[in-house]
Image (cartoon, rainbow, N blue to C red):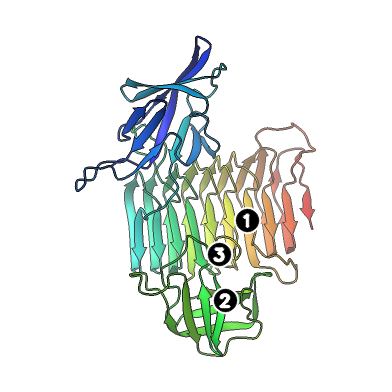
Amino acid sequence: AAPQVIDATVATTGVTDGHAYRVLSIPVGSPYKVNGTHITWLGEKSPATGQPYWSGVDGLQYTQIHDPKAQRTWRADNPLFNDVAAVTDLGGRRIRIDYTTEARPADAGLVYQMRLIERTEPGAFIWQSKNVTMRSMNAYYLQSFGVVGQFSENISIDKVNFAPAPRSGRSTSSFADFVQMSGVKGKVSITRSVFDGPHDDPINIHGTYLEVVGKPGPSTLTLAYKHPQTAGFPQFAPGDKVEFATKRTMTALANPHAKVTAVDGPSGMDHDKPLTTMTVTFDRPVPAGVEIGGTVVENITATPSVVISGNVFRNVPTRGILVTTRKPVLITGNRFDGMSMASIYVSADAYQWYESGPVDDLTIRGNTFTRPSGPVIFVEPTNQVIDPATPVHHNISVEHNSFDIGDITIVNAKSVGGFAFTGNTVRRLDGPAHPPYASPLFVFHGSSGLRIAHNRYDKGLNTSVVRD
């Protein structure tokens, strides 16, 4: 009822008696109290205790800025509560902030989206389920996290409107990601939906690498979640197939596959066992080359094929789609407008978020990218050793898309074997009328099997490629 994101619109700005001021407009459903030179934001009151479920002061812990006219959202510092001389509640959900400074603020019309940062629950949770469909829904606001699908099979999201309620005065519709699919098998289908106003990535589909931290037996390993926000849920079940990979190269060991026969670890339902470690037994001896601290393990049974089709992405401060799965992925017929980071991002990460794994068959076809930030398509696994002969990702095709860009890079790809950019249309929206431009269209690191052909460019476009 009282979202933990405050969408404060700068209604007016000015200068009175040599002091600058702003007047903020606050949406209905965001309780607050003015205390001297500070504002305390409040959640709704608990019917049990009579106390608000949450509270925070001034700019809270994190801010995004939304420009309703330009239809863009980005991460930035919050100036609203710097050099404050006085705070006055004007009534009608309008707050005046006077400053000790003289210059009139130049941010009238902008919206400061302010929130705390702790994620205490998902907005919706799909857990150990099969054949789940969300269809024809309005998701006006997802608190704390988004829609999380975890260790389930066959999830479809169709015609879901992830966007703020009309006339609500809000521009935020999710505290974090919209959709995160983690360790899902079968097929993930996300179609005909709108993704507007998140505080993190609209779609993230991945598995989870666990790091080897012990070898208690010839066919047994102790594995650990390494990111501090990841814990408590089972990662493997008897019968699951796994792959062993070297952290420094992010590639599989020789003879890398085994089947799980037993697991001793967290259940996802209680705290009876350690939440960050588990002991896993396999149907064969642990392969040569497995090293404590140097090897990660992925559940390759819990990896889905993916179709993301016919969606709209807008007012996004981050990436549009993150996807790392070895099964076939088709991203087609989508419209990405004004992404503040890469529109499509492919990682495979065993150093920070530990989101697995390699891409083996990714097709990006027939999409429209308008006003993007660069690189539009970003492939960046976390391998520390880069060898074109042993790439992390394989078989990425970018075909028949439309790119309306400024002076930015379209593709930046690291450690890919087999990358095709064909039949696309590229148009310049701004920047110099003629080359040279500051940014090459293509940058490749440690990649091979590259094909760039049959594309249509604006007259005079610099089609430079940087390779190393």
Residue beneath disc 3:
354
Mark 1 neighbour density, 10 Å: few (under 14) some (14–19) many (20 or more): many
Residue 278 can be seen, yes or no: yes
Name the amino acid, label 1: Val
Picture residue at 79% right of the left edge, 58% below the top: 468
Q: Which mark is residue 212?
A: 2
Q: Where is residue 75 shown, x and y percent of the image?
A: 54, 40
Name the amino acid, label 2: Val
Q: Where, quadrant-wise, is the N terminus in this rendering? A: top left
Measure the C-alpha gap from mark 2 to mark 1: 36 Å
Q: Are marks 2 and 3 in contact (CB under 8 Å)?
A: no
- Establish if 247 lies above or below 400: below
Is label 1 in a helix, a strand or a loop? strand
Q: Are marks 2 and 1 in contact (CB under 8 Å)?
A: no
Residue beneath disc 1:
398
Q: Where is residue 168 shown, x and y percent of the image?
A: 33, 33
Mark found first going from the N terminus, 2 or 1: 2
Name the amino acid, label 3: Tyr
